[in-house]
Amino acid sequence: MTIKDVSNRLHEQAMQEILSRAVGYPTTEKLGSIASRYSSDPAYRAFAIFDAELPVGVIGIEFRSPARCRILHIAVSPSLERAGIGRRLIERVRDIKGLEELDAQTHSGAVPFYRSCGFAVTSRGELYPGVERFSCFWRST
């Protein structure tokens, strides 16, 4: 499996199918807007992991500074969940030269994943009725 920068390819159907798993209430318009942001703004980058020529996972990040970025989207094909794909995507982002800090916001179901990737996790409380959200933070050592 290989990982490639796909910031200019998120409009492709196969990419959007995976990306939609990381977007709340995904619509064609919403996914198109997200894809446009990644292709037009250099502060946003997306990477995908491929099995042969088929994308099986995607991660989207926003640089807050040269040393800090936020994970905005991360998703893996359902058939390959728990196979290390998400971890490999996070490791790829951590390999960006000069990156010192990485953060994300997530739901309770993803907390074990982020903890297993070395993130410190804190509750942000119920930001929406009945939905607890979490902040995840990683710092280079």
Image (tube, rainbow, N blue to C red):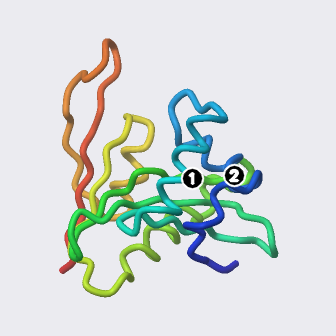
Residue at (31%, 58%) from the top-left corner? 70
Q: Is residue 3 left or right of residue 130?
A: right
Give how far across and how far down residue 54 sits, in percent. Answer: 79, 66
| Amino acid of disc 1 | Ala
Q: Is residue 137 left or right of residue 95?
A: left
Residue at (48%, 62%) from the top-left corner? 40
The residue beneath circle 2 is: 77
Identify the image quadrant of residue 98: bottom left
Of 62 and 42, nearer the camera is: 42
Of 61 and 7, nearer the camera is: 7
Give how far across and how far down residue 89 sits, in percent. Answer: 51, 68
| Circle 1 residues within 10 Å: few <14, some 14–19, many ≥20 | many
Location of the C terminus by quadrant is bottom left
Mark 2 or mark 1: whose residue is earlier in sequence: 1
Of 136 and 98, nearer the camera is: 98
Q: Residue farthest to the front? A: 40
| Amino acid of disc 2 | Ser
Identify the image quadrant of residue 29: top right
The residue beneath circle 1 is: 35
Give how far across and how far down residue 20 sits, in percent. Answer: 62, 41
Residue 122 vs 128, above or below: the answer is below
Of 43 and 98, nearer the camera is: 43
